[in-house]
Image (cartoon, rainbow, N blue to C red):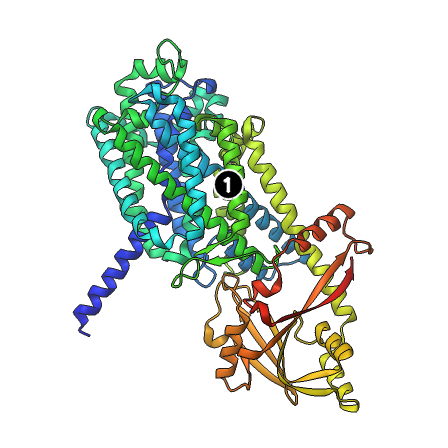
C-alpha cells in the first residue's frame, strides 16, 4: 500500500468518525433551537421580547454554550477518559480507583455519581417527548387547524421509535450523520437569512448584555436561566459518546459545524423577533387568543419561508427522532455498565450489531422508557408545558460531573489543590446557578425526573448493598477449594467422562453446586472447570489479556475471565479461548452447573426491611445466569441454595 493510499484511508476514517459523531452525539443539543427561545419568552415567565431582553437572551445562550460545552466538556472533562471511554460511569470508575483520605468520602462520591447516572434516566424520558412534540408542533405554523393532530402524530412517531429499538441502530446508523449534517446546514442558512435583515443582533454576543439582562430583570432574569439551559441539554452526551468516536472527532464536529450552526440559528431567531418586534410581543408575551388563537408562535418555524415549512417539519421530526434514538441508546449503555459494575442484577441484553460491541438492546429499559415518555406526552400535551419539567435533571448531572471530574484532577492527576478548587468553584457557580433556577420547575413538572431518579438510585444502591451482603454471607460459609480437593484424596468420588463447568463468583472458594453434585450424585467429572468472571474498572479488556488458567488438582482447573464494564461475558467463547491456550476441554458436550440462590429476607443484616423486600423482588426477576452468560439451555444444571439476609 502506498503512503498516498494510507493517507486517503486515514482521511476517510476521520471523515467517517466526524460524520458519525454528528448523527449520534449532537442530536439532543442540535435540536434545542426548536424550543429554547420560545420557552424563554413564554407569557407566564413575565419576560417580554424587548430588544434588551433579546440581546440578553442571546448573550446568555452564547456564553452558556461556550462555558459549559466548549470549555468544561470539550476542553477539560473529555480529557478524563477511562481507557478511551467517557460518561458519568467512566468518572465513577475513575473515582473508585482513586486514593482518597477516607473510605466514607469515596463512598459518598460514588453514591453521588450513581445519583447522577440515575438523573440520566429522567433526562432520557423527557428528551424524546419534548423533542418530537416540538417538531410536530411546527405543523401549526403553516396550518393552525392541524393543532388537533399534533398529539396523535407525536404518539405514533414515538411508538414507531420504541418498537424499532429491537432492530438496533446499525441498520439506520449510516443515515444519522448525513441527516444531522443537513440539519445543521439548514440551521445555519435560516440564521444567516434572518441576520441579514438585522445584522446588529450580533451585538448580543457581548457578555455585557447578559449582565444587563440580570440587572434589568432581577429575579425574573435569574429564573429565565431555567429556559436558557435548554440550549445546552445534551452536553453530557459529548462526553458519554467519547468512546464511540474519540475526542478528536467530537471536537472537530463541535467547533467545525455544530457550534457555528447553533450560534447562527439562535441569532437568527433573535433577529426575527427584533425585526418583527411588535408582532412578536403580541404573540409570544401576551399570547392573546384574538391575535394568536392557537398560542403556537414559535420563532424557529417563523424563520422558515412559507414554502419550506412543511418540509422543515419533516426534517425536524427526523432530527428529533435521531436525537431521541441517541438518548435511548445511551440509556441502554448506562444500564449495561451498571449491570457490569454490580449496581443492577443481570438483565436481558441483545446485541444488535455483529460489528459494534456498544450496540445493545435492553427490552426492560426500552419499555420502561416508552411508558414514561407516553405518560409525559399525554400528561403535558405540548413542548411548552414539558419545558417546565425539563432542565432540573440535566443541571443536576452537569454539577455532579464537575465535582467528580475535579476529584479526578486532584486525586488521580495530582494537580495542585488550588487549581482543582478554583476550577471546581468556577464551573460549579455556573452549574448551580442553572440548577437553582430550575428548582422552581419542581412543582410544575420537574418532580417527574427527580422521582424517576430517586427510584432508580434507590434500586441501584439497594441492589449493590444487598449483593454485597449475599456475597459476604456466602463467603462465610464457603469451603476453601484447596481444603475441599485435599479431602477428596482420602475418599475420591467416582470419575465419569465429560466436562463439568461450575460458575463461581469467588476465585478461592468451592462452588456450592460442586459440593452438592458430589454430595448427592457421588460423582466427579473427568474434566472440571471452575469458571470465574471478573469485571474490572475499565471499559474493555483485550481478548489476549482476558483468560488465565490454573491447574488445581488432576482434571480440575480454574479459569479466570476478566471483562471490562462495557464487555459482555460469554462463557462458551471464553472456554474456547482457554482451549486454544492448551486446556483440554470438550466444550460442545460440557455440562454447566449453576448455583441458584434463593433470598429469604429474615436475617439481621443491617438492611432496612423494605430494602430487603425490594432486593428480594429484584433478585427474583433478574435474568437467569444461563441466559446472561450465553450458556446453551440444554446443557445447564441448576442446584439451589438458600441465603438469609
Image quadrant in which you'd find residue 41: top left
Image quadrant in which you'd find residue 342: bottom right
303 relative to 472 in the view: left or right: left
Q: Does 84 appear above or below 72?
A: below
456 relative to 261 in the view: left or right: right
340 relative to 314 in the view: left or right: right
Residue at position x 64%, y 48% from top?
Answer: 459
Q: Could you tell me residue 84's position as x and y percent?
A: 43, 61
**Residue 429 visible from this viewpoint:** no
364 relative to 36 in the view: left or right: right
**Residue 583 visible from this viewpoint:** yes
Viewer-side residue, 131 vs 168: 168
Identify residue for label 1: 370
For the N terminus, the quadrant is bottom left
Viewer-side residue, 585 vs 420: 585
Q: Does 213 appear above or below 240?
A: above
Q: Does 618 appear above or below 280?
A: below
Sort mark 1 into few (<14), some (14-19) or many (20+) by Cα contacts within 10 Å: many
Q: Could you tell me residue 395's position as x and y percent?
A: 50, 39
> Which element carries disc 1, helix, strand or loop?
helix
Amino acid at each position: 500500500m502506498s503512503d498516498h493510499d494510507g493517507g486517503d484511508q486515514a482521511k476517510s476514517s476521520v471523515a467517517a468518525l466526524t460524520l458519525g459523531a454528528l448523527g449520534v452525539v449532537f442530536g439532543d443539543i442540535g435540536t434545542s433551537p426548536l424550543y429554547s427561545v420560545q420557552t424563554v419568552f413564554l407569557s407566564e415567565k413575565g419576560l417580554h421580547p424587548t430588544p434588551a431582553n433579546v440581546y440578553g437572551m442571546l448573550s446568555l445562550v452564547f456564553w452558556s454554550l461556550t462555558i459549559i460545552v466548549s470549555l468544561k466538556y470539550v476542553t477539560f472533562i473529555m480529557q478524563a477518559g477511562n481507557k478511551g471511554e467517557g460518561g458519568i460511569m467512566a468518572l465513577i470508575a475513575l473515582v473508585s480507583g482513586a486514593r482518597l483520605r477516607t473510605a466514607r468520602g469515596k463512598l459518598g462520591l460514588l453514591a453521588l455519581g450513581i445519583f447522577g447516572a440515575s438523573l440520566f434516566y429522567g433526562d432520557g424520558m423527557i428528551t424524546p417527548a419534548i423533542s418530537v412534540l416540538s417538531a410536530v408542533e411546527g405543523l401549526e405554523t403553516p396550518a393552525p387547524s392541524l393543532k388537533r393532530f399534533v398529539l396523535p402524530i407525536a404518539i405514533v412517531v414515538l411508538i414507531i421509535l420504541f418498537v424499532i429499538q429491537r432492530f438496533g441502530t446499525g441498520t439506520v446508523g449510516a443515515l444519522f450523520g448525513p441527516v444531522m449534517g443537513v440539519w445543521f446546514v439548514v440551521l445555519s442558512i435560516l440564521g444567516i437569512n434572518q441576520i441579514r435583515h438585522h445584522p446588529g443582533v450580533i451585538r448580543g454576543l457581548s457578555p455585557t448584555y447578559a449582565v444587563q439582562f440580570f440587572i434589568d430583570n432581577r429575579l425574573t432574569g435569574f429564573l429565565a436561566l431555567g429556559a436558557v439551559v435548554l440550549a445546552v441539554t445534551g452536553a453530557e452526551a459529548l462526553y458519554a459518546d467519547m468512546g464511540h468516536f474519540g475526542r478528536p472527532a467530537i471536537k472537530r464536529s463541535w467547533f467545525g459545524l455544530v457550534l457555528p450552526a447553533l450560534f447562527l440559528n439562535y441569532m437568527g431567531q433573535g433577529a426575527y423577533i427584533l425585526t418583527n418586534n411588535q408582532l412578536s410581543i403580541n404573540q409570544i408575551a401576551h399570547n392573546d387568543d384574538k391575535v394568536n388563537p392557537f398560542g403556537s408562535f414559535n420563532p424557529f418555524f417563523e424563520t422558515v419561508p412559507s414554502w419550506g415549512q412543511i418540509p422543515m417539519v419533516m426534517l425536524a421530526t427526523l432530527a428529533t427522532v435521531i436525537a431521541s434514538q441517541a438518548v435511548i441508546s445511551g440509556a441502554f449503555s448506562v444500564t449495561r455498565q451498571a449491570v457490569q459494575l454490580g449496581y443492577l442484577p443481570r438483565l436481558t441484553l441483545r446485541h444488535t450489531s455483529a460489528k459494534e460491541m456498544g450496540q445493545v438492546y435492553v427490552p426492560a429499559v426500552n419499555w420502561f422508557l416508552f411508558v414514561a415518555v407516553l405518560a409525559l406526552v399525554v400528561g403535558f400535551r405540548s413542548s411548552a408545558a414539558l419545558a417546565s419539567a425539563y432542565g432540573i435533571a440535566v443541571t443536576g448531572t452537569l454539577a455532579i460531573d464537575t465535582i467528580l471530574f475535579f476529584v479526578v484532577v486532584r486525586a488521580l492527576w495530582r494537580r495542585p489543590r488550588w487549581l482543582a478548587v478554583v476550577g471546581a468553584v468556577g464551573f460549579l457557580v455556573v452549574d448551580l446557578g442553572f440548577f437553582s433556577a430550575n428548582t422552581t420547575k419542581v412543582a410544575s413538572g420537574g418532580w417527574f425526573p427527580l422521582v424517576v431518579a430517586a427510584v432508580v438510585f434507590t434500586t441501584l444502591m439497594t441492589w449493590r448493598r444487598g449483593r454485597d451482603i449475599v456475597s459476604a454471607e456466602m463467603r462465610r460459609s464457603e469451603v476453601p477449594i484447596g481444603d475441599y480437593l485435599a479431602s477428596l484424596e482420602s475418599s475420591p468420588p467416582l470419575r465419569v467422562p465429560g466436562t463439568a463447568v461450575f460458575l463461581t463468583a469467588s476465585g478461592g472458594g468451592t462452588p456450592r453446586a460442586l459440593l452438592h453434585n458430589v454430595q448427592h450424585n457421588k460423582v466427579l467429572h473427568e474434566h472440571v472447570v471452575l469458571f470465574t468472571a471478573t469485571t474490572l474498572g475499565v471499559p474493555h479488556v483485550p481478548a489476549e489479556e482476558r483468560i488465565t488458567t490454573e491447574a488445581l488438582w488432576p482434571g480440575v482447573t480454574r479459569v479466570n475471565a476478566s471483562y471490562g464494564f462495557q464487555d459482555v461475558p460469554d462463557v462458551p467463547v471464553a472456554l474456547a479461548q482457554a482451549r486454544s491456550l492448551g486446556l483440554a476441554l470438550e466444550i460442545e458436550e460440557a455440562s454447566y452447573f449453576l448455583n441458584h440462590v434463593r433470598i429469604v429476607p429474615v436475617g439481621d443484616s443491617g438492611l432496612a426491611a423494605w430494602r430487603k423486600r425490594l432486593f428480594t423482588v429484584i433478585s427474583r426477576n433478574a435474568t437467569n445466569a444461563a441466559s446472561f452468560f450465553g450458556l446453551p439451555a440444554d446443557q445447564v444444571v441448576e442446584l439451589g441454595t438458600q441465603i438469609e439476609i
